[in-house]
Image: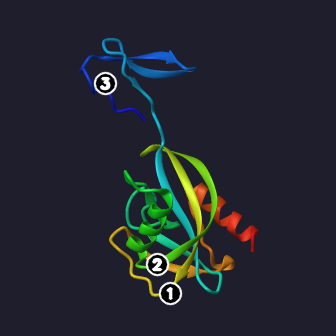
Amino acid sequence: MSSFDFCPLCKAHLRRRQIDGRRRLICSSCGWIHYENPFPVAVCVARNKKGEILITRRNLAPGKNKWALPGGFIESGEDPEETCLRELREETGLDGKIVGLIGVYIQRTGRYGNLLIVGYAVKVFGEEISVNHELKEAKFVNRRQLPFIPFSTHRIMIKEVFKKL
């Protein structure tokens, strides 16, 4: 998902060329190469003492009005674990502790291009949820109550967590 027409260093036109086995934008004037790297995201499968999973109904695109797991973009200078717990706290008001890495995934999106998603299992402290503007609602559900979640990586992470139970 490239938004470049001109080189950000010297302002010359960019051209597509084969570099390292891929078609990339390159500046024929200064040689700058645009590598289309994925945006890093951290997501959590947060569980309460009863083993229920925290799900959130999104208030923003993508997936507005759809169910998802808490998570968000990793900010500069932040590690994925910090992001995971920050997003959980910002979105739901809940604190937690990371108990394990679920996995690392690539999700292709129309809005952001490729995302590199780091999924964590989290033990939540407390159950009083306070959603921010990014969410319509959030709640804990057991396996039988789990609604459809459109984000394929979220479904995979939930499945991985339930496999270990």
**Disc 1 marks which amino acid?**
Gly
- CB of mark 3 within 8 Å of CB of mark 2? no
The residue that appears at 52% across and 83% down in the rendered structure is: 125
- Residue bearing the label numbered 2: 95
| Label 3: how many Cα within 10 Å (few below 14, some 14–19, many 20+) | few
Q: Is residue 55 above or below residue 42?
A: below
- In the image, residue 60 above or below residue 17: below
Mark-to-mark CA distance, 1 and 3: 50 Å
Whichever of labels 3 and 2 marks the residue nearer the N terminus, that label is 3
Instruction: Confirm whether residue 136 shows in the render.
Output: no
Whichever of labels 1 and 3 marks the residue nearer the N terminus, that label is: 3
| Circle nearer the viewer, 3 or 2 | 2
Residue type at the position of mark 3: Asp
Residue visible at 45% across and 63% down in the picture: 82
Apparent side of residue 128 relative to residue 121 in the rendered image (left or right): left
Please tell me which residue lies in front, 136 or 53. 53
The secondary element bearing badge 2 is classed as: strand
Q: Position of residue 96 (x, y in %)?
A: 51, 76
Mark 1 and 2 residues: CB-CB less than 8 Å, in contact?
yes
Q: Residue at x 71, y 70 (%)?
A: 162
> Tag 3's secondary structure?
loop
